[in-house]
Amino acid sequence: MKKFIFIFFLVIINNYAQNSGELIETYPVFPVCELLPYKFQKNCFNETIDDHIQKNFIYPKQAWENDLEAIVKVKFDIDQNGSVSNVISNSSVVGVSFFERESLNLAKKLFNDAASKLIQTLPDAIPAKKNNIAFKKTFLVSVKYQIPRKLGFDEIETPPLFDDCAESENEKLCFIKFIDDHISKNFKYPKRAIKKGEEGNVFIQFDMTSDGLYTNFTTIGESRILEDEAYRIMIKLPYFEPAKYKEKYVTTTYGTTISFKLDQWKK
């Protein structure tokens, strides 16, 4: 499965095994953080782990195909030699009933293995030290595996498809052209706006859902009459096949601007 570039994971790093009352003189230091002042090294440590997870994040293929999601807590040590050790993952899975024990255990293993691999591939670090003596330090990281249900138009791989675009070589370009043509064919300058001398641009945005519906229309313009006309035009859009991301139907948001100019109408 390709990398899941989406931002649907949260990394939380905690000190998991401090000895009460003892001062930790230094934090583990990854190579990229070595030249930073001491006060910045802890943040650099956390950011390095976050960056490593983002760059190496892979959604388990079988879990993706079966619509499974999870939050995995990964406990690990950075030992006296600066190496990652004792990696233990524990996942909470969404999409499998608690009573389906065999399926649940398989799902847990998929996510646990994927999250453990992320942490096991961290680079070696200069170990944490107390009084200049290296010691083992334990951390806890939470990795979230979540399938996107809604993506921006630029993020989707396949746009919503109208029948006219089914055979198009450039589906996104065809989608945009279809919308523009639809606006032109259905455009009517409202008589009330003409009488009032109202003109301007109306930006209209809406969702095209994974169920094939148009929802959440929003209009921004200087005239309510023109906003209503933009809405009337867009609700006449025909049926579409929903957008796709990695072969899954997703909801996407699209927006466009409709121009109302009196001088063009008079011509």
Image (tube, rainbow, N blue to C red):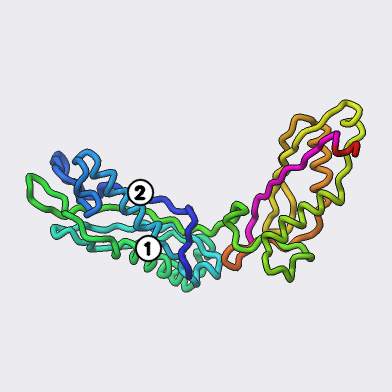
Secondary structure category for the residue under label 1: helix
Quick one: 97 or 21, which is closer to the camera?
21
Give the image location of residue 159, x and y in percent. Answer: 66, 60
- Disc number placed over residue 187 in the picture, else none: none
User: SS class of the residue under badge 2?
Assistant: loop
Dividing the image into 4 quarters, which one contains the C terminus? top right
Determine the residue positioned at 54% across, 63% down: 95
Q: Residue at 50% of width from left, 57% of height from top?
A: 146
- Residues packed near mark 1 inside 10 Å, few (<14), some (14 to 19) or many (20 plus): many
Type of amino acid at the residue the image marks with label 2: Ile
Does the magenta segment cover residue 44? no
Q: Position of residue 235 (x, y in %)?
A: 81, 48
Q: Which region is colored magenta? A: 249-263
Main SS of the magenta part reads: strand
Residue visible at 67% across and 60% down in the picture? 172
Looking at the rendering, which quadrant does residue 156 occupy? bottom right
Q: For mark 1, what is the residue? A: 115
> Mark 2 — residue?
12
Asked if the residue at tag 2 contacts the one at tag 1, i.e. Cβ–Cβ closer than 8 Å, the answer is no
Residue 197: image x %, image y %? Answer: 86, 27
